[in-house]
Amino acid sequence: MKLVIEDDYAALSRTTAAVLAGAMLQDRRVNLSITAGATPAGTYRLLAPLLAARPADLDNVHFYSFDEIPNGTDRGVTRTSLDQQIFGPAGIDETRIHALTLDNADRIRADLRDHGGLDLMLMGLGADCHFCGNMPGTTRYDADIYLYEVHPGLPWYHLIEDIDPAPTRVVTFGFPMVLRARQAVLIVSGAAKAEALAEILTGPIGADRPGTILRTHPNLLLIADRDAAALIEPDGAGSWRRR
Amino acid sequence: MKLVIEDDYAALSRTTAAVLAGAMLQDRRVNLSITAGATPAGTYRLLAPLLAARPADLDNVHFYSFDEIPNGTDRGVTRTSLDQQIFGPAGIDETRIHALTLDNADRIRADLRDHGGLDLMLMGLGADCHFCGNMPGTTRYDADIYLYEVHPGLPWYHLIEDIDPAPTRVVTFGFPMVLRARQAVLIVSGAAKAEALAEILTGPIGADRPGTILRTHPNLLLIADRDAAALIEPDGAGSWRRR
Amino acid sequence: MKLVIEDDYAALSRTTAAVLAGAMLQDRRVNLSITAGATPAGTYRLLAPLLAARPADLDNVHFYSFDEIPNGTDRGVTRTSLDQQIFGPAGIDETRIHALTLDNADRIRADLRDHGGLDLMLMGLGADCHFCGNMPGTTRYDADIYLYEVHPGLPWYHLIEDIDPAPTRVVTFGFPMVLRARQAVLIVSGAAKAEALAEILTGPIGADRPGTILRTHPNLLLIADRDAAALIEPDGAGSWRRR
Amino acid sequence: MKLVIEDDYAALSRTTAAVLAGAMLQDRRVNLSITAGATPAGTYRLLAPLLAARPADLDNVHFYSFDEIPNGTDRGVTRTSLDQQIFGPAGIDETRIHALTLDNADRIRADLRDHGGLDLMLMGLGADCHFCGNMPGTTRYDADIYLYEVHPGLPWYHLIEDIDPAPTRVVTFGFPMVLRARQAVLIVSGAAKAEALAEILTGPIGADRPGTILRTHPNLLLIADRDAAALIEPDGAGSWRRR
């Protein structure tokens, strides 16, 4: 694991955009799986105009979504968000977008296997330590892609309670899929994530705080801002401890 | 995971030797971590004379041991066994042997990180699902290299009870280290391992049967003979189930 | 470059088969480009029954031919030979055979780029130092895949003069395509190839002896038997010189 | 080859810095070989403060110089320039700088081989198509690292004529070493380089215009600004032609 602490969200966004640009600028097909949501918004605002300005330069880059929450339309919550945040503004051609749905896990799995695998996954971290759709109470560490039922009794149901019609199932990449990515990048911003980040770095691994497993990835890059990193410090032996 | 079922132990040994030979014959430094014990004996009988006959051809290959059980001599149980089984007969130069000890974890970790990482790990599987020194009751899934105390109360203590003087601590690579190997190869032979193999393939992941985690490795090759594979069958969907 | 010298053709074939087996036994798609002809015949006799016995185990392996000499049928000389030597006996499914033809270079190039690239190329060496269809007098070092006209005035025309109807054009992978393979394996057997091997190792690089360029490949494995290696010896500095 | 055309030198520098940052931010040792000179100056001005601000974050990055022109001091022209442009301002520790000299080619070759090889080479392009120290009239395409004599009769001697005392020999990585880098990055800025860039992309490969060979690299990223790209245009088939 490599942890980089940036001064603020703007610096975090610049570094993340640089890492993505470096990953894309290869003379071969590149497969990325990238997160929707608030944390990457700054990164995508930097990247989208660059991508839009040079469609031919980056036609080697394919995008895979790593979870989906159906919302009664033909595009679920994740895909709709990615469309608005990056695929639309960047002008990514539909043929290079591979959206996960409730019923295409076999196809996505085979497609990635057949096209060189994931080069990089960009993920956010929940305040409850979730990553992708791996949530406390529903996480399975053994499944590469899996579905689960959602219902109001889940501790994190408030995160999806405004979706109308209410979703009944969610699909997500599990940790074995993250392991297959040559690089895993986790971006964490803001004081509200400080406890989760400390847990990721120092807590016991357990599916009730799903992201704790991420630190076993062979090539994890963690980009945090100072607020998110407020509860940790170097332990003097190359690792991190709680302050 | 790729599972190859060979007719018998001789065929398993030939295939394993071929995989190791292919991994070694590269024009760059190659780092291997290989198991001692009964299962690889046939493989090493095939490989040792080939290695001994061509010292210059394979001076790019370095060997790392992945566990150690001190036995009161300057070389512990694992290193002594590897010396007898392969390092001695193959004539491997001492400068290319990097033995794990109770007190050199930091150095081994840094050494691998600095020299390109592990290309391949060859492991056996215990009837209790242990791999390397990751044993039921003492396994930590979060530690890349770790020490633990051993005492007669451990369920598997009989495996080491004949060592004199009795070991008090064991050191081993944990699963995060296996994840860093570009290929993990697990060899399983004989009816006594059939239940363990079935568990590895189909059981829930849990540190009480440590090897269950191995199936999340991004590039696991499992080589079994028919006796070891007696309790499983293809599930028709690209995976395996209990018969 | 790594050069391995085997006692005889049988040993060369065993080592080559081991290298190919190791390359195939991965839990991901593997793309191979393999040669037809006399030199690999022993290798294929070892491999074909293994492949035929386990169709499901190796359905991750795809085969690309690297040259073609049209002969008036729907399958040219190279493809026909590969069918007889390996694809037929090994029972390789047609969907995993990607044959080069006079008019599909763009498709093959895109297909490889889109599916992770070549893992390994297995090539033979001509007594005139040709490799693939890169022949003295017609070799272009700058083209990844190229066509050229053939006619009786070419110095090596005797190699194809028995083909009826006489070919007028040949297509081949050039050296840039070989460079894209993660490992290049060149097998050389018999006294008739000894001069060519010495030239490959010690002569100036030039398109009139096309294979001389191969030694610049970043990961070249050269497997020769003693007869083929009769004119060279180690130079004491990690390389080779003429005896 | 992937060619990216940026609006101006500032944009070229930003993209190049992003590519370098992405390459460095890995959780493993990273080996870079980077150029001195005018073209990377903007890149280094962006990178140096970032590197200086976070010494611990990038202690996995090692630097290799790819040529040297002795100037009678203990540090030659290349090393002195790199010290001033990047190693000094970025605060790179001496233990992570591996400078090429007239007499350490064997050590550098072995060192790279033993530490995972080059991840990325950043090179400039001369108006005479030279790259690294591979100059018209003295370039050897077959040598991984080589020395040559310099004298006033060389066509490019004016480039070094101000060095006092006058150098008599130069050492450089050759193209086989560039081939071993996982990614080759060539940066080209300004109208004075437009003819050289057009030659690189469209001219015949030949040691009299050394850089023409670069387009055979399996993963070449070419970053040019509009002025440097003034003489070329897309050919409509995925490649480039002269306007």
Image: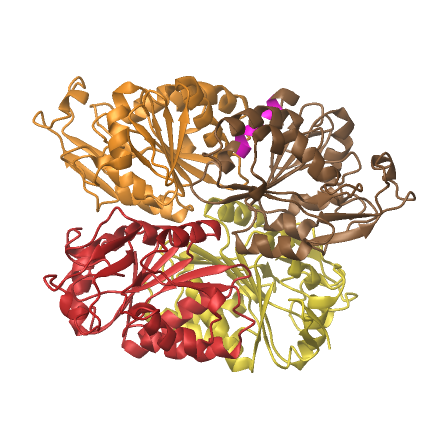
Chain colours: A brown, B yellow, C red, D orange
Q: At x 76% / y 67%, what residue is drawn?
A: B152
Front-most of residues B212 and C37: C37
Q: Quadrant of the C terminus of chain C?
A: bottom left
Name which quarter of the figure residue D195 lies in: top left
The answer to whether residue B95 is visible is yes
Q: At x 24% / y 72%, what residue is drawn?
A: C189
Q: Quadrant of the N terminus of chain C?
A: bottom left
Magenta stretch: helix, strand or loop mostly:
helix
Q: Position of residue C234 (x, y in %)?
A: 21, 61
Q: Position of residue D151 (x, y in %)?
A: 10, 28
Name which quarter of the figure residue C104 lies in: bottom left
Q: At x 66% / y 27%, what residue is drawn?
A: A41
The answer to whether residue B101 is visible is no
Q: Position of residue B20 (x, y in %)?
A: 46, 66
Magenta residues, as a range?
A: A11-20
Count of numbered badges drawn on the protein: 0
Q: Position of residue D198 (x, y in %)?
A: 27, 30
Front-most of residues C198 and A236: C198
In the image, is residue A18 part of the stretch drawn in magenta?
A: yes
